[in-house]
Image: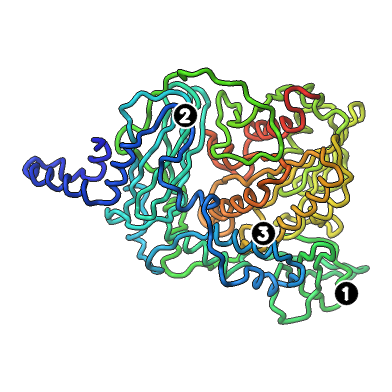
Amino acid sequence: MDPAARQMIFPFCLQRPLFMILALVTVFLVYINFPNVKMYRMLNMHSISGSDPQWSRYPLPKIYSTMQQEVEMQKTDWTHRLVQYGYQNHSFTPEERTEGTVLMQMIKWPKPPNPAVPFQKSSDASRARFVILNSGKTFYVRDQLQVMLRMYDFEGNPKQYGGDFILARIHTPELKAGSVGTVIDNQNGFYYINFNLSWPGKVQVSVSLVHPSEGIQVLERLREERPDRVNFKSAFRLGTTSETTLCNLYLTQTKPLCNFTDLRTGEPWFCYKPEKLPCSSRINHAKGTYVKGLLKGDEVIYFKRGSNIKKPILPYIPGYITVEPSRHAVGASQECVRGKPMLSPSGYYFQDQWMSTTCNIRSFDTAAKVTGCLHGKKVYLFGDSTIRQWFEYLIAFVPALKKFDLGNPEKIGPHLAVDTENNIIVEFRPHGPPIRFTTVSSQDLRYISNELDGIKGGKDTVIGITLWSHFSTFPVEVYIRRLQNIRRSILRLLGRNPDTVVVIKTANVQALPGEVSLYNSDWFSYQLDIVMRKMFTDINVGFVDAWEMTVAHYLPHELHPRTVIIKNQIDVLLSYVCPAGKE
């Protein structure tokens, strides 16, 4: 048994010489009978091989890799809630119904055994500890590293169930290097975290508890019971008369409604009808207020500023190893090709440059390189403000790309930029509601699916898509239906012109001060991200893994990542457009 792991589990006995004999007997008995120690012993018997790139020897993930497991069909049709919201029951194909059922089961999160766990019995990051397994061995680049974590509650008792949301990374600050870990929840208080070692030197392990399982139980309740916790509004104007009313995906019919359901996609949206004006006089859409007073009783404790959100978990012994250069030659990377599944980890940082684990990411570090790649191309960026950052980066980095003033607010759009000399057009357009922007013209509230249906496509057309953040307050069923509509339009577009480059940007992590988690928790985003990745698997699209690119980086988590991260996202995008210097 690894001494570090043994001390981590039994520190009390080992620090009391008077009880040494009893301690040795106890260690032996627990080692033989305690299932987690048995598991640890098994892991040592099947130690990590430096030449084996797979994780097949480790326990199958029970939470974070649920996409790889078979799922049982739920008896309740997932479309039931959507029909209540105004979606048309006949619009769902049998395949879509089955897919939605599988997806909802796939993201099902384990709950604490007791729905009313006292806060003192919840997970405490300050008491939890992790240990590097086989820390005494010599590690080489391309080896795998595994960490074991034990969770405790605030009273110092080991947790007997899982469900905590944990993020982990390895990093070397001097090299500006970093990579994410894959968390495996054994649902008994023990977690294993797997890392690929991709660079030599001193490599540190950092682990954080984003939310305890008891806090996630609260987030789940809010998602299911309070989809109205952010409301929206629209102004209506006719002549000199104007009114503003409440809007949302679903409104109780306490008074007449204006039905703004999109006729082509069937996506519903409603506003309360103005008292004096017709529904046709709507002029804009805007976010309203964030509803307060959502928490009940002790739930408040889980979301207080500085309480138990994104708290670091410390190692039991020094949480670092030294990695030696690889003993094997590294083969040349392939070109980035659309249609391949996204692996995890999908890449790592080295000297602040994102390196893909599957293909060669080119560095477009000059305006000339970007211009050369985009020469003669139309670039369409659809989604939220995190993809608007791509537009902002390109017009700031490429002087010849001039923004054409459409008179729209800078942080909202739509926006257009043109390089007439190189025949480049870049357009950003926000996705349709729900979207929590300040004010968007009604005429600019367009659904991505409809926009894609209006694009001819071809080898000179590049499309970037993301949407996730503005769906975090709604049941996941709403997000699944939106992606089904978008995917259907992507398939039609690729059917018309298979050479069209379509790239999906995933969600990213963000800062979670105080009650921000109630509306935009990383856990909400993570669940949506799992759905997005699964739904676009086996489709001829590329991926920009913004999730891993923000978790792995040394900069603090922000909803809108800083320029160095956006630059690397653009490098991945353009590596699909212009692989191996094919401008």
Of marks 3 and 1, which one's residue comes earlier in the chain?
1
Residue underneath mark 3? 479
Pick the front one: 246 or 187: 187
Where is 569 relative to 324, above or below? Answer: below
Q: How is the image coloured?
A: rainbow
SS state under label 2: loop
Tell me the kind of residue under disc 1. Answer: Pro
329 lies left or right of 98: left
The quarter of the image holding the N terminus is top left
26 lies left or right of 573: left
Residue underneath mark 1? 278
Where is 113 relative to 305, above or below? Answer: below
The quarter of the image holding the C terminus is top right
Of marks 2 and 1, which one's residue comes earlier in the chain?
2
Residue reaching furthest to the bottom? 254
- Check disc 2: other Cα within 10 Å, few if <14, some if 14-19, many if 20+: many
At 7% from the left edge and 43% from the top edge, which residue is drawn? Answer: 21
SS state under label 3: helix
79 lies left or right of 378: left
Q: Measure how far apart labels 2 and 1 are at the Cα level.
A: 62 Å
Tell me the kind of residue under disc 3. Answer: Tyr
At 49% from the left edge and 19% from the top edge, which residue is drawn? Answer: 328
